Image (cartoon, rainbow, N blue to C red):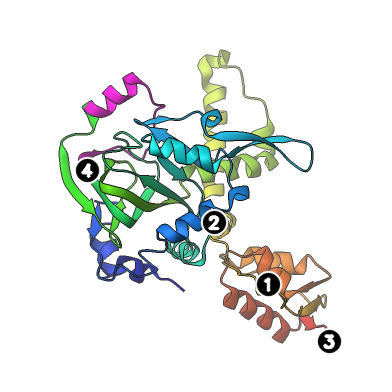
Amino acid sequence: MTTLDEILAPITSAEFFADYHDRKPLYVPAEDPGSPARRPLDWAGFNALLDQASIWNAAHLRLYKDVTRIPETDYCNRVPTQDGQVMLRPSPAKVQVCLADGASLVANEVQFLNPAMSAVADALSRRFAALVGANIYCSFHGVRAFGTHFDSHDVWALHLEGEKVWRIYQNRADNPHVFPPDSPEARRWVETTRGPVMHEIRMKPGDLLYLPRGWYHDALADGGASLHLTYSVTPLDGRALLGVLAQTMVQDSAFRAFLPPAHLEDGRPLAAHLADLARRLADQVSSPAMLEEMMTAQARLSPRVAPYALPHVPKLTFYRVTGLHHPVPAGPMAAPVRWMFAQPAFAIEDLLAEFEGHDPDRLRQVVDGAVKAGALARVV
Protein backbone atom coordinates (compact mmCIF):
# COMPACT_ATOMS: atom_id res chain seq x y z
CA MET A 1 0.00 0.00 0.00
CA THR A 2 1.44 3.37 -1.06
CA THR A 3 1.71 6.06 1.63
CA LEU A 4 1.93 9.83 1.51
CA ASP A 5 5.46 9.64 2.93
CA GLU A 6 6.52 7.43 0.00
CA ILE A 7 5.04 9.93 -2.46
CA LEU A 8 6.81 12.87 -0.78
CA ALA A 9 10.16 11.23 0.06
CA PRO A 10 12.59 12.50 1.21
CA ILE A 11 10.17 15.15 2.54
CA THR A 12 8.07 13.74 5.37
CA SER A 13 4.32 14.20 5.62
CA ALA A 14 4.87 16.08 8.90
CA GLU A 15 7.13 18.60 7.10
CA PHE A 16 4.64 18.88 4.28
CA PHE A 17 1.71 19.75 6.55
CA ALA A 18 3.80 22.10 8.66
CA ASP A 19 5.33 24.11 5.82
CA TYR A 20 3.56 23.55 2.48
CA HIS A 21 0.02 22.20 2.57
CA ASP A 22 -2.34 24.92 1.29
CA ARG A 23 0.49 27.43 1.83
CA LYS A 24 2.98 27.28 -1.03
CA PRO A 25 4.27 25.08 -3.87
CA LEU A 26 6.69 22.23 -3.22
CA TYR A 27 9.18 20.74 -5.68
CA VAL A 28 10.83 17.44 -4.70
CA PRO A 29 13.54 16.06 -7.04
CA ALA A 30 13.61 12.29 -7.45
CA GLU A 31 15.81 10.27 -5.09
CA ASP A 32 14.69 7.04 -6.75
CA PRO A 33 13.36 7.72 -10.29
CA GLY A 34 12.06 4.14 -10.45
CA SER A 35 9.82 4.39 -7.39
CA PRO A 36 6.23 3.37 -8.30
CA ALA A 37 5.00 6.00 -5.84
CA ARG A 38 6.65 8.71 -7.97
CA ARG A 39 6.79 7.09 -11.39
CA PRO A 40 3.83 4.71 -11.75
CA LEU A 41 3.94 4.73 -15.57
CA ASP A 42 6.49 4.88 -18.41
CA TRP A 43 6.31 5.11 -22.20
CA ALA A 44 5.72 1.37 -22.59
CA GLY A 45 2.92 1.39 -20.04
CA PHE A 46 1.33 4.46 -21.60
CA ASN A 47 1.42 2.95 -25.08
CA ALA A 48 -0.16 -0.22 -23.68
CA LEU A 49 -3.01 1.84 -22.22
CA LEU A 50 -3.56 3.72 -25.48
CA ASP A 51 -3.59 0.44 -27.41
CA GLN A 52 -6.75 -0.55 -25.52
CA ALA A 53 -8.68 1.50 -28.05
CA SER A 54 -12.13 0.39 -26.87
CA ILE A 55 -11.76 2.06 -23.43
CA TRP A 56 -11.22 5.53 -24.90
CA ASN A 57 -13.79 8.06 -26.03
CA ALA A 58 -13.72 11.70 -27.01
CA ALA A 59 -14.24 12.86 -23.42
CA HIS A 60 -11.39 10.80 -21.97
CA LEU A 61 -8.82 11.32 -24.72
CA ARG A 62 -8.38 14.88 -25.89
CA LEU A 63 -5.92 16.69 -28.15
CA TYR A 64 -4.72 20.30 -27.88
CA LYS A 65 -2.61 22.48 -30.14
CA ASP A 66 -1.44 26.01 -29.42
CA VAL A 67 -3.51 25.99 -26.17
CA THR A 68 -6.68 25.27 -28.19
CA ARG A 69 -8.62 22.02 -28.06
CA ILE A 70 -8.71 20.14 -31.36
CA PRO A 71 -12.28 19.28 -32.46
CA GLU A 72 -13.23 15.68 -31.70
CA THR A 73 -14.21 15.07 -35.32
CA ASP A 74 -10.61 15.72 -36.38
CA TYR A 75 -9.29 12.63 -34.59
CA CYS A 76 -12.31 10.45 -33.84
CA ASN A 77 -14.34 8.02 -35.93
CA ARG A 78 -18.08 7.47 -35.67
CA VAL A 79 -18.31 3.90 -34.43
CA PRO A 80 -21.54 1.86 -34.15
CA THR A 81 -22.09 0.11 -30.82
CA GLN A 82 -23.75 -3.22 -30.09
CA ASP A 83 -26.95 -1.51 -28.92
CA GLY A 84 -27.36 0.38 -32.19
CA GLN A 85 -26.00 3.71 -30.95
CA VAL A 86 -23.14 5.64 -32.55
CA MET A 87 -20.21 7.00 -30.52
CA LEU A 88 -17.12 9.04 -31.27
CA ARG A 89 -14.03 6.89 -30.64
CA PRO A 90 -10.48 8.18 -31.05
CA SER A 91 -8.71 6.70 -34.06
CA PRO A 92 -5.13 5.68 -33.16
CA ALA A 93 -3.99 6.56 -36.69
CA LYS A 94 -5.63 10.00 -36.64
CA VAL A 95 -4.36 10.73 -33.12
CA GLN A 96 -0.79 10.00 -34.19
CA VAL A 97 -1.13 12.26 -37.25
CA CYS A 98 -2.23 15.09 -34.94
CA LEU A 99 0.68 14.43 -32.59
CA ALA A 100 3.10 14.52 -35.52
CA ASP A 101 1.56 17.88 -36.47
CA GLY A 102 2.37 19.40 -33.06
CA ALA A 103 -0.58 18.43 -30.90
CA SER A 104 -0.45 17.39 -27.24
CA LEU A 105 -2.46 14.49 -25.85
CA VAL A 106 -4.39 14.47 -22.57
CA ALA A 107 -5.80 11.21 -21.22
CA ASN A 108 -8.40 11.93 -18.52
CA GLU A 109 -9.63 9.91 -15.52
CA VAL A 110 -6.83 7.33 -15.67
CA GLN A 111 -6.37 6.84 -11.92
CA PHE A 112 -7.60 3.25 -11.92
CA LEU A 113 -6.00 2.02 -15.17
CA ASN A 114 -3.00 0.35 -13.53
CA PRO A 115 -2.28 -0.76 -9.95
CA ALA A 116 0.55 1.72 -9.31
CA MET A 117 -1.48 4.77 -10.40
CA SER A 118 -4.44 3.49 -8.39
CA ALA A 119 -2.29 3.10 -5.26
CA VAL A 120 -1.12 6.73 -5.46
CA ALA A 121 -4.70 7.93 -5.97
CA ASP A 122 -5.86 5.88 -2.98
CA ALA A 123 -3.13 7.28 -0.72
CA LEU A 124 -3.95 10.88 -1.65
CA SER A 125 -7.70 10.34 -1.37
CA ARG A 126 -7.51 8.83 2.11
CA ARG A 127 -5.00 11.29 3.55
CA PHE A 128 -6.91 14.36 2.35
CA ALA A 129 -10.48 12.96 2.53
CA ALA A 130 -10.75 14.04 -1.09
CA LEU A 131 -12.02 13.09 -4.50
CA VAL A 132 -8.96 12.26 -6.61
CA GLY A 133 -8.68 12.09 -10.38
CA ALA A 134 -5.65 11.65 -12.62
CA ASN A 135 -4.75 12.87 -16.11
CA ILE A 136 -1.77 11.95 -18.30
CA TYR A 137 -0.19 14.71 -20.41
CA CYS A 138 1.93 13.84 -23.45
CA SER A 139 3.70 16.77 -25.13
CA PHE A 140 6.61 17.34 -27.46
CA HIS A 141 9.50 19.80 -27.68
CA GLY A 142 8.37 23.40 -27.60
CA VAL A 143 4.69 22.48 -27.27
CA ARG A 144 2.37 23.93 -24.62
CA ALA A 145 -1.06 22.31 -24.31
CA PHE A 146 -2.44 24.95 -21.93
CA GLY A 147 -1.68 28.58 -21.27
CA THR A 148 -1.12 30.07 -17.83
CA HIS A 149 -3.95 29.03 -15.52
CA PHE A 150 -4.87 27.96 -12.02
CA ASP A 151 -6.88 24.96 -10.86
CA SER A 152 -9.83 24.63 -8.50
CA HIS A 153 -8.13 21.68 -6.80
CA ASP A 154 -4.70 20.88 -5.38
CA VAL A 155 -2.28 19.57 -8.02
CA TRP A 156 0.18 16.70 -7.50
CA ALA A 157 2.29 16.34 -10.65
CA LEU A 158 4.53 13.28 -11.10
CA HIS A 159 6.97 13.53 -13.98
CA LEU A 160 7.28 10.27 -15.91
CA GLU A 161 9.40 10.68 -19.06
CA GLY A 162 11.46 13.38 -20.76
CA GLU A 163 11.65 16.89 -19.35
CA LYS A 164 9.20 19.74 -18.90
CA VAL A 165 9.75 23.28 -17.66
CA TRP A 166 7.11 24.56 -15.24
CA ARG A 167 6.75 28.23 -14.45
CA ILE A 168 5.17 29.02 -11.09
CA TYR A 169 3.89 32.57 -10.76
CA GLN A 170 3.76 34.67 -7.63
CA ASN A 171 0.01 35.04 -7.28
CA ARG A 172 -2.76 32.72 -6.16
CA ALA A 173 -6.51 32.91 -6.75
CA ASP A 174 -8.65 32.92 -3.60
CA ASN A 175 -10.23 29.45 -3.24
CA PRO A 176 -11.43 29.31 -6.87
CA HIS A 177 -14.17 26.89 -7.88
CA VAL A 178 -13.94 27.47 -11.65
CA PHE A 179 -11.47 28.82 -14.20
CA PRO A 180 -12.92 31.25 -16.77
CA PRO A 181 -13.59 29.81 -20.25
CA ASP A 182 -10.76 30.38 -22.69
CA SER A 183 -11.05 33.65 -24.62
CA PRO A 184 -8.77 36.57 -25.52
CA GLU A 185 -10.27 38.52 -22.60
CA ALA A 186 -9.61 35.68 -20.17
CA ARG A 187 -6.01 35.34 -21.35
CA ARG A 188 -5.41 39.07 -20.86
CA TRP A 189 -6.97 38.86 -17.40
CA VAL A 190 -4.65 35.98 -16.47
CA GLU A 191 -1.59 37.88 -17.68
CA THR A 192 -2.50 40.87 -15.53
CA THR A 193 -3.32 38.87 -12.38
CA ARG A 194 -0.71 36.08 -12.33
CA GLY A 195 2.20 38.25 -11.16
CA PRO A 196 5.86 37.68 -12.01
CA VAL A 197 7.47 34.25 -12.33
CA MET A 198 8.37 33.02 -8.85
CA HIS A 199 10.00 29.69 -9.77
CA GLU A 200 11.06 28.01 -12.99
CA ILE A 201 11.42 24.27 -12.48
CA ARG A 202 12.74 21.67 -14.89
CA MET A 203 10.88 18.46 -14.12
CA LYS A 204 12.62 15.13 -14.78
CA PRO A 205 11.49 11.50 -14.34
CA GLY A 206 10.51 10.78 -10.75
CA ASP A 207 10.23 14.46 -9.76
CA LEU A 208 7.20 15.69 -7.80
CA LEU A 209 5.53 19.10 -7.89
CA TYR A 210 2.75 20.08 -5.49
CA LEU A 211 0.67 23.18 -6.24
CA PRO A 212 -1.99 24.41 -3.83
CA ARG A 213 -5.40 25.19 -5.27
CA GLY A 214 -5.49 28.46 -7.19
CA TRP A 215 -1.75 28.83 -7.86
CA TYR A 216 -0.98 30.28 -11.32
CA HIS A 217 1.30 28.10 -13.47
CA ASP A 218 2.07 26.85 -16.96
CA ALA A 219 4.35 24.16 -18.41
CA LEU A 220 6.33 23.60 -21.61
CA ALA A 221 7.85 20.36 -22.92
CA ASP A 222 11.60 20.75 -23.39
CA GLY A 223 14.28 18.52 -24.83
CA GLY A 224 11.98 16.14 -26.74
CA ALA A 225 8.88 14.15 -25.84
CA SER A 226 7.53 14.57 -22.32
CA LEU A 227 5.08 12.58 -20.22
CA HIS A 228 3.66 13.51 -16.84
CA LEU A 229 0.80 12.42 -14.61
CA THR A 230 -1.24 14.92 -12.60
CA TYR A 231 -3.48 14.02 -9.68
CA SER A 232 -6.27 16.44 -8.82
CA VAL A 233 -7.07 16.39 -5.09
CA THR A 234 -10.45 17.93 -4.25
CA PRO A 235 -11.76 17.74 -0.67
CA LEU A 236 -15.33 18.74 0.09
CA ASP A 237 -15.95 22.43 0.69
CA GLY A 238 -18.80 24.36 2.29
CA ARG A 239 -21.07 23.76 -0.70
CA ALA A 240 -21.36 20.13 0.38
CA LEU A 241 -22.92 21.34 3.62
CA LEU A 242 -25.42 23.44 1.69
CA GLY A 243 -26.42 20.41 -0.35
CA VAL A 244 -27.10 18.36 2.76
CA LEU A 245 -29.02 21.21 4.36
CA ALA A 246 -31.23 21.57 1.29
CA GLN A 247 -32.28 17.94 1.78
CA THR A 248 -32.62 17.91 5.58
CA MET A 249 -34.19 21.30 6.29
CA VAL A 250 -37.21 20.61 4.11
CA GLN A 251 -38.27 18.20 6.86
CA ASP A 252 -38.68 21.21 9.15
CA SER A 253 -42.12 22.80 8.74
CA ALA A 254 -40.65 26.27 9.28
CA PHE A 255 -38.61 25.95 6.08
CA ARG A 256 -41.69 24.87 4.14
CA ALA A 257 -43.68 27.88 5.33
CA PHE A 258 -44.13 30.86 3.00
CA LEU A 259 -42.10 33.99 3.74
CA PRO A 260 -44.08 37.02 4.97
CA PRO A 261 -44.44 39.82 2.41
CA ALA A 262 -41.64 42.36 2.69
CA HIS A 263 -44.03 45.34 2.65
CA LEU A 264 -45.75 44.37 5.93
CA GLU A 265 -44.72 46.48 8.95
CA ASP A 266 -41.59 47.75 7.21
CA GLY A 267 -40.34 44.17 6.77
CA ARG A 268 -40.28 43.31 10.48
CA PRO A 269 -42.24 40.02 10.13
CA LEU A 270 -39.92 38.96 7.31
CA ALA A 271 -36.85 39.84 9.37
CA ALA A 272 -38.17 37.86 12.34
CA HIS A 273 -38.95 34.88 10.14
CA LEU A 274 -35.46 34.92 8.62
CA ALA A 275 -33.88 35.18 12.06
CA ASP A 276 -35.83 32.11 13.18
CA LEU A 277 -34.66 30.18 10.11
CA ALA A 278 -31.07 31.24 10.82
CA ARG A 279 -31.31 29.87 14.37
CA ARG A 280 -32.70 26.60 13.07
CA LEU A 281 -29.89 26.38 10.51
CA ALA A 282 -27.25 27.03 13.15
CA ASP A 283 -28.69 24.29 15.36
CA GLN A 284 -28.71 21.83 12.46
CA VAL A 285 -25.17 22.67 11.30
CA SER A 286 -23.74 22.18 14.80
CA SER A 287 -25.70 19.00 15.51
CA PRO A 288 -24.08 15.54 15.92
CA ALA A 289 -26.26 14.36 13.03
CA MET A 290 -24.67 16.88 10.66
CA LEU A 291 -21.17 15.91 11.80
CA GLU A 292 -22.03 12.29 11.10
CA GLU A 293 -23.44 13.19 7.68
CA MET A 294 -20.30 15.09 6.66
CA MET A 295 -18.00 12.33 7.95
CA THR A 296 -19.93 9.84 5.84
CA ALA A 297 -19.77 12.16 2.81
CA GLN A 298 -15.98 12.40 3.17
CA ALA A 299 -15.66 8.62 3.50
CA ARG A 300 -17.58 8.13 0.25
CA LEU A 301 -14.83 10.01 -1.59
CA SER A 302 -12.26 7.29 -0.79
CA PRO A 303 -13.62 3.88 -1.82
CA ARG A 304 -11.26 1.04 -1.04
CA VAL A 305 -9.20 -0.46 -3.82
CA ALA A 306 -10.58 -4.00 -4.19
CA PRO A 307 -8.61 -5.80 -6.91
CA TYR A 308 -10.16 -8.85 -8.51
CA ALA A 309 -8.67 -12.27 -7.74
CA LEU A 310 -10.79 -14.44 -10.00
CA PRO A 311 -11.59 -17.29 -10.09
CA HIS A 312 -11.53 -16.86 -6.31
CA VAL A 313 -14.63 -15.18 -4.89
CA PRO A 314 -15.13 -14.38 -1.19
CA LYS A 315 -17.11 -16.67 1.07
CA LEU A 316 -19.99 -14.71 2.56
CA THR A 317 -20.36 -14.52 6.34
CA PHE A 318 -23.94 -13.81 7.45
CA TYR A 319 -25.33 -12.22 10.60
CA ARG A 320 -28.93 -11.79 11.74
CA VAL A 321 -30.44 -9.08 13.89
CA THR A 322 -31.69 -10.51 17.20
CA GLY A 323 -34.03 -7.66 18.09
CA LEU A 324 -32.04 -6.61 21.14
CA HIS A 325 -31.51 -2.85 21.26
CA HIS A 326 -28.02 -1.69 20.29
CA PRO A 327 -26.92 1.96 20.65
CA VAL A 328 -25.85 3.93 17.60
CA PRO A 329 -22.36 5.39 18.12
CA ALA A 330 -21.51 8.98 17.31
CA GLY A 331 -19.20 9.68 14.39
CA PRO A 332 -18.45 7.86 11.15
CA MET A 333 -19.63 4.44 12.37
CA ALA A 334 -23.19 5.67 12.94
CA ALA A 335 -24.35 5.18 9.34
CA PRO A 336 -22.99 1.60 9.08
CA VAL A 337 -24.65 0.65 12.38
CA ARG A 338 -28.00 2.04 11.23
CA TRP A 339 -27.64 0.12 7.97
CA MET A 340 -26.89 -3.15 9.80
CA PHE A 341 -29.93 -2.94 12.04
CA ALA A 342 -32.21 -1.95 9.19
CA GLN A 343 -31.67 -5.44 7.68
CA PRO A 344 -33.14 -8.66 9.06
CA ALA A 345 -29.82 -10.30 8.07
CA PHE A 346 -26.73 -9.29 6.14
CA ALA A 347 -23.32 -10.51 4.99
CA ILE A 348 -20.36 -8.67 6.46
CA GLU A 349 -18.87 -8.58 2.96
CA ASP A 350 -21.96 -6.66 1.84
CA LEU A 351 -21.45 -4.22 4.74
CA LEU A 352 -17.83 -3.66 3.68
CA ALA A 353 -18.93 -3.07 0.07
CA GLU A 354 -21.77 -0.72 1.05
CA PHE A 355 -19.40 1.41 3.15
CA GLU A 356 -16.24 0.97 1.10
CA GLY A 357 -14.89 4.35 2.17
CA HIS A 358 -14.85 3.29 5.84
CA ASP A 359 -12.01 1.49 7.61
CA PRO A 360 -12.78 -2.24 7.16
CA ASP A 361 -11.13 -3.18 10.45
CA ARG A 362 -13.34 -0.72 12.33
CA LEU A 363 -16.43 -2.08 10.58
CA ARG A 364 -15.50 -5.60 11.66
CA GLN A 365 -14.94 -4.36 15.22
CA VAL A 366 -18.42 -2.82 15.22
CA VAL A 367 -19.93 -6.13 14.11
CA ASP A 368 -17.93 -8.06 16.73
CA GLY A 369 -19.09 -5.62 19.42
CA ALA A 370 -22.73 -6.03 18.41
CA VAL A 371 -22.32 -9.84 18.52
CA LYS A 372 -20.82 -9.68 22.03
CA ALA A 373 -23.68 -7.42 23.12
CA GLY A 374 -26.22 -9.93 21.77
CA ALA A 375 -27.67 -7.58 19.17
CA LEU A 376 -26.31 -9.65 16.26
CA ALA A 377 -25.88 -13.41 15.89
CA ARG A 378 -23.67 -15.26 13.44
CA VAL A 379 -25.63 -17.40 10.98
CA VAL A 380 -23.93 -20.77 10.76
Left or right: where 217 falls relative to 151: left
Which quadrant of the figure has residue 365? bottom right
- Residue 78 at x, y percent in the picture: 65, 33
**Which residue range is magenta in the image?**
168-191
Between 55 and 119, the one lying in front of the other is 55
What residue do we see at 78% from left, 65% from top? Answer: 342
The amino acid beneath tag 4 is Arg
Task: Say which residue label 4 marks.
Answer: 167
| C-alpha gap between disc 1 and disc 2 | 27 Å
Query: Which comes sooner in the sequence, label 4 or label 3?
Result: 4
Task: Say which residue label 2 marks.
Answer: 301
| Label 1, residues with CA under 10 Å away: few <14, some 14-19, many ≥20 | few
**117 drawn magenta:** no
The amino acid beneath tag 1 is Pro
The amino acid beneath tag 2 is Leu
262 w.r.t. 339: above or below:
above
| C-alpha gap between disc 4 and disc 3 | 63 Å
| Label 2, residues with CA under 10 Å away: few <14, some 14-19, many ≥20 | many
| C-alpha gap between disc 1 and disc 4 | 55 Å
| C-alpha gap between disc 3 and disc 2 | 34 Å
Whether residues under marks 2 and 4 lie with C-beta atoms below 8 angstroms apart, the answer is no
| Label 3, residues with CA under 10 Å away: few <14, some 14-19, many ≥20 | few
Q: Is residue 140 in sight in this rendering?
A: yes
Checking the image for residue 380, the label placed there is 3
Left or right: where 187 falls relative to 89: left
Task: Say which residue label 1 marks.
Answer: 327
- Residue 104 at x, y percent in the picture: 39, 40
Left or right: where 242 falls relative to 167: right
Question: SS for tag 2?
Answer: loop
Query: Which comes sooner in the sequence, label 3 or label 2?
Result: 2
Which quadrant of the figure has residue 191? top left
